[in-house]
Image: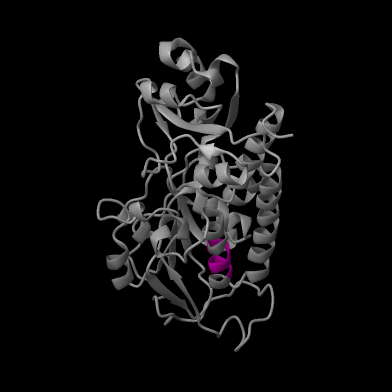
Amino acid sequence: MSPRTRLGAAFVLALTVTGCAAPAETVPSSGPSSGGSPAQQVVTVTSCGQELSFQRPPSRAVTLEQSSTELLLALGLQDRMAGTSNLKTEIPPRYRAAYERIPVLNPKIITSEQLRAATPDLAVSPFASLFTKDRAGTREELHRAGLPTYVSAVDCPDLAENGLTPFDLLFQDYENLGRIFRAEERAAALVAEQRAAVEAAAASGKEATGRPSILWLYSMFNGVPYVAGDGGMPSAMSELLGAENAFDDVDELWPEVSWEEVARRDPDVIVIGDLSERGRPGDSAEEKIAMMRENPLAAELTAVRENRLIEVPGIEMDPSVRTVDTLRLVADGLRRLGRVR
């Protein structure tokens, strides 16, 4: 599919953050709402410190990154999307037909000009870092222009209630977007399905033999590993599976580390992110394994010598509607390796 770009339109937004807009076609309600019909009731949610209000469902949403794109597709909202951007890997077959109906505003990171040209009424991103002056524009300036911006709750854990896990925050996104688009039942069904997968993983974790340590290897640049630190989905998945993230003491999501430090920790299992479709040297799982076997320190790691390696799609190490798929893959891998009875 060739990327399609909307060009030349002025940034005239029909819907403001307070919901003062001309009537728009609404998403069919997935269930009754208290206090009025879905088309009339003002829905208010909080997103990473900003309060967003909608008098009616957005009809021209733009997503700033693939995981947000796939979440809206999982909620059946493709007809409410005016554009996508920042494709990192292939869209899964289950979303592909719907995805191909939506304009691609930029296959990489969208610019402010491209975002504004699409005349959106909502911009959705998993990361606040995409809302900067040199990218899509700051959330504050877009708010002043009348464009509400939704950032995943997982990217703002400091603003969350105590005790919520990254999966809890991800499910909060499903519920919030379900409310915004008046697709509450679809969101609830998605939460129920994925919460069941999380509970199954937790049950398998209770059967773990010991407490294996897992190195989550995301990428390698010039032979240097980038691994999961504290606070992200890998730590949450490790905990659920009765394991520990080998670099859980590093207060950074994806720190650069040395093979000397990895060797000192000598993890029981290495989960390897496959990013082959990104196309950079060392991105594929196959390349990462070859590089580890060629590196004198990495080759002597117990997990490498004994082939305790689990391959997963790299994109699923970050919070997304697909993360539970990697949770299942790692649970199955640990069972195959004998770490779960």
Name the residue at the right extreme.
Answer: 341
Q: Please state the horizontal and vertical placement of residue 259, each as a whole percent of the image.
A: 39, 22
Q: Is residue 281 visible?
A: no
Q: Is residue 255 left or right of residue 24?
A: left
Residue at screen point 47% across, 39% down: 88
User: Which quadrant of the figure contains the C terminus?
Assistant: top right
Q: Please state the horizontal and vertical placement of residue 60, each as a whole percent of the image.
A: 48, 65
Q: Overall secondary structure of the magenta stretch?
A: helix
Q: Quadrant of residue 270?
A: top right
Name the residue at the front extreme.
Answer: 210
Image position of 227 with respect to 84: above or below: above
Q: Please state the horizontal and vertical placement of residue 141, each as a whole percent of the image.
A: 27, 66
Q: Nearer the viewer, residue 133 or 307?
A: 307
Q: Please state the horizontal and vertical placement of residue 205, each as a whole percent of the image.
A: 66, 43
Colour scheme of this structure image? one colour
Residue at screen point 40% across, 41% down: 249
Q: Nearer the viewer, residue 10 or 302?
A: 302
Q: Nearer the viewer, residue 167 or 107?
A: 167
Q: Quadrant of residue 122?
A: bottom left
Region rendered in magenta: 173-178
Residue 175 is a magenta residue: yes
Q: Nearer the viewer, residue 236 or 212?
A: 212
Residue at screen point 45% across, 10% down: 294
Residue 203 is a magenta residue: no
